[in-house]
Image (tube, helix red, strand yellow):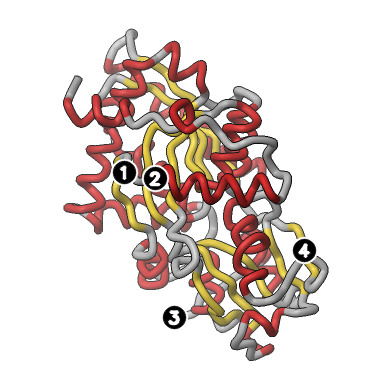
Amino acid sequence: MKVQWTKPQLALTRRQCLAATGAGALVLGLAASRAGAAAATIRQGYQTNIWGMPTYYLLKSGYLEKHGIAVEEFAVPSGNLTMQQMVARQVDLGTYAAQSFVVGNAKGSLVAIALIEHVGKTARITTRKDLNITKVEELRGRRIANQTGSSVGNVFVDTIMPQHGLNKGDYVEVRMDVNNMVAALAAKTVDAMVNVEPYNVVAVADGIGNDLMDFSSVDQMPVFMAATPDFVQTKPDTVIAYLKAWLDVAGDFKNAPQKVADVIYKFYTDKGYNMSLDTFARALSRVEVNPGFPRDLQPYMQQQAEILLADKKISAIPDWKAALRPDFMERARAGS
């Protein structure tokens, strides 16, 4: 079954995001108010690509209300925008990969309270099918859609392209939101896109694009749940209750995957995306959800920070003891 794409279907407009945000906040706020006036309120940011869908499921699961938390939703196209909202203190919590987190820590002292998922398999270079490109080296001189400043965009520019002998200036980087890229690929205004699911899988399913490579062989791309330092300092009990809700979500991803898939699939169909359930299932299967806080993260984070420092995207390596806070997840698991 082919996926029918039109430009209006591809773009999640600001109006749509605000409408979804308002409706979600109202529903969740009402549910929380029924739970009791003492419910803590959080401002949750999430991206509307597949990376943000575990967070979206958290918002719709009822687990936050179970743990006494009300929520306001802030939906954006990609995690680096959530990071910017958090630096501006417009949002309390949000998910994004290591590269955006390091930048957010440098700009706004953001704190990682959990590792939510690994998404290296969802990040892909997808090329126009008619060009028959089979090697990254063949992107020389091509027009490539990239959401500049995102974690995927940084890995593409700073790591993947140099590994294949291509540096800035060897290709044309077209700055674009991820949710507009398939339309640009279909219109042949770009030759390739650096994107995340479900946009890559639907481009392939509809005969628009070919997968060139995913990022997992280069970077497993851990995605963190980050918090503002003032939120962590003033609401530590809320942070722990929030992470308990995430542990409940982890149980659903493990034991009730169809329930999870149905909720997330509805998110996209409600926004006008016309993709088959099989196509969506392929995209979701590439997200590895396992909330926790592995103890071996610091060497990886140090490596990413050194790349960003060399590229002058940060001015100093973060203080990892302040930036990485596994203690909250430990207390959530312990039930305290």
Position above or below: 151 against 67:
below
Are the residues tagged 3 and 2 within 8 Å (C-beta)? no
- Where does the image place residue 163, in percent across and percent down from the top left? 62, 72
Viewer-nearest of discs 3 and 2: 2
Viewer-nearest of discs 4 and 1: 1
- Where does the image place residue 55, in percent across and percent down from the top left? 40, 42
SS class, disc 2? helix
Q: Amino acid at mark 1?
A: Pro
Q: Which residue is labeled 3 in the image? A: 1
- Where does the image place residue 196, in percent across and percent down from the top left? 53, 61
Q: Residue furthest top?
A: 38
* Distance from Cα at disc 2 to Cα at disc 1: 6 Å
Total marks placed = 4
Are the residues tagged 2 and 1 within 8 Å (C-beta)? yes
Q: Which residue is labeled 1 in the image? A: 294
Viewer-nearest of discs 1 and 3: 1
Q: Is residue 335 left or right of residue 59?
A: left
Instruction: Choose between 246 and 168: the one closer to the eye.
Output: 168
Evaluate whether residue 223 shows in this view: yes
Q: Which residue is labeled 2 in the image? A: 297
Question: Reading the chain from its start, which is encountered first: label 3 or label 2?
Answer: 3
